[in-house]
Amino acid sequence: MAERVAIVHDWLNGMRGGEKVLEEMLALFPQADIFTLFYEPEAVTPLIRSRKVTASRLNRNRWIRGHYPLFLPWFPRHVEAFDLRDYSLVISSSHCAAKGAVPAPEARHLSYVHSPMRYAWDQYYSYFAGAGFWRRWIVQREISRLRAWDVASSARVDRFAANSTYVRQRIERYYRREAVVIHPPVDTDFFQPTDRPRRDYFLLVTALVPYKNTGLVLEAFRQTGERLVVVGRNSGRRTPGRLAGTNIQWLPAVSAETLRELYQNARALVFAGVEDFGIAFAESQACATPVIAFDRGGVRDIVVDRVTGVLFPEASLPGLKAALDDFCRLDLDPGAIRANSLRFSRSRFREEFGRFVGGGRQ
């Protein structure tokens, strides 16, 4: 009898790096059912829509769906409410609460962690320091309880996989558990170099949230006058349009084909924040475009300093401007940049994740 598989994913309201990982899991387990806190079918791909998706009761309220960060303290109880009794294998794809799902006693629970609950741990102040009074008050009341739940629920997981060395270290620190590193997949067949790249601008691809440190990049390019194209969603507060100079162009959303073209023709992808992994770094390199980034977090697994990009040690205006100057003096090999990206192919992910699932209990 075939093993019944449930995949628990925090929420499905867009296609980002975590959802690309989910798609590869679905390719490995064609009959898997999906459980998620929030579900917007029109925001995901046909592959995800084709599966049986069970959303939490929170999803029934349109206003809650539109303001879901306000309800962070409610997430644990709703993840625990998923009925997983009939599944012998539970896979959680987690950056928030999904790894706290409750499997049947005899079931295996394997957790692929994009990040420990960042809202409760290392990114707490970035997310909530500037929040309004009510949001900050609600979260501050509950944050210790959330942290205790996050640690306690890690005991429900048989084995952990982390998307980067950086995340593996945080799993060990917060949960006192070991994890194997399996880097997320990049569609290196889709993201490929172009024959005659223009190389007439720098590129920033990021969600516009505080910990991404977007303002530092904008200020650096305002001062240098170099052309910068920014692709990213508005965080709801300040926008690049308000911060930008005449040399900075903001594109709030683009198609996959347009994003590929932007990667292909950029001089370099620039980033000054800390990513858990940073799939844009690998996608850029797949298009033979180097990366200039702050030397911390998942980028250390992706970029080879002074071979496929430049890593700078200090997230400051002088540090970034020095890295830009250093980059302009280098002659990086596009072939080596492209070759480095092949370490993150989809086939490699499926092979490594398949071995992880077949490895039994820890």
Image: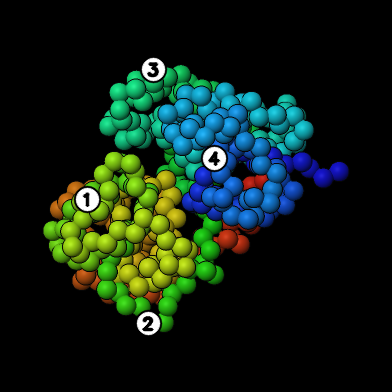
First in sequence: mark 1 or mark 3?
A: 3
Q: Nearer the viewer, mark 4 or mark 1?
A: 1
As helix, strand or loop, the secondary structure at mark 2 comes to: loop
Q: Amino acid at mark 1?
A: Arg
Q: Label 2 vs label 4: CA separation?
A: 39 Å
Quarter of the image where the C terminus is located: top right
What is the CA distance from the residue labelled 1 to the residue labelled 2? Answer: 33 Å
Task: Reply above or below: 17 against 122.
Answer: below
In this view, the residue farthest toward the front is 62
The single residue placed furthest to the bottom in the displayed view is: 196
Percent from the top left, x then y, of residue 127?
34, 34
Q: Residue at x 56, y 44 (%)?
A: 40
Q: Is residue 110 visible?
A: no
352 or 148: nearer the viewer:
148
The residue that mark 4 highlights is: 11
Looking at the image, which is closer to me, 26 or 231?
231
Amino acid bearing label 2: Arg
User: Which residue corresponds to the image point at 63% horizontal and 55% vertical from the top-left?
Assistant: 46
Which residue is label 1 attached to? 242
Mark 3 surroundings within 10 Å by alpha-carbon count, few (fewer than 14), some (14 through 19), many (20 or more):
few
- Quarter of the image where one finds residue 118: top left
Seen in the image, is 161 located left or right of residue 301?
A: right
Point out the image quarter for the N terminus: top right
Q: Which residue is mark 3?
A: 141
Q: Earlier in the sequence, mark 1 or mark 2?
A: 2
Q: Nearer the viewer, mark 1 or mark 2?
A: 1
Residue in the image at 23% along x and 61% along y: 248
Q: Which residue is mark 2?
A: 196
Under mark 4, the amino acid is: Trp
Instruction: Measure how far apart labels 4 and 3 are at the Cα level.
Output: 24 Å
The local secondary structure at tag 1 comes to helix
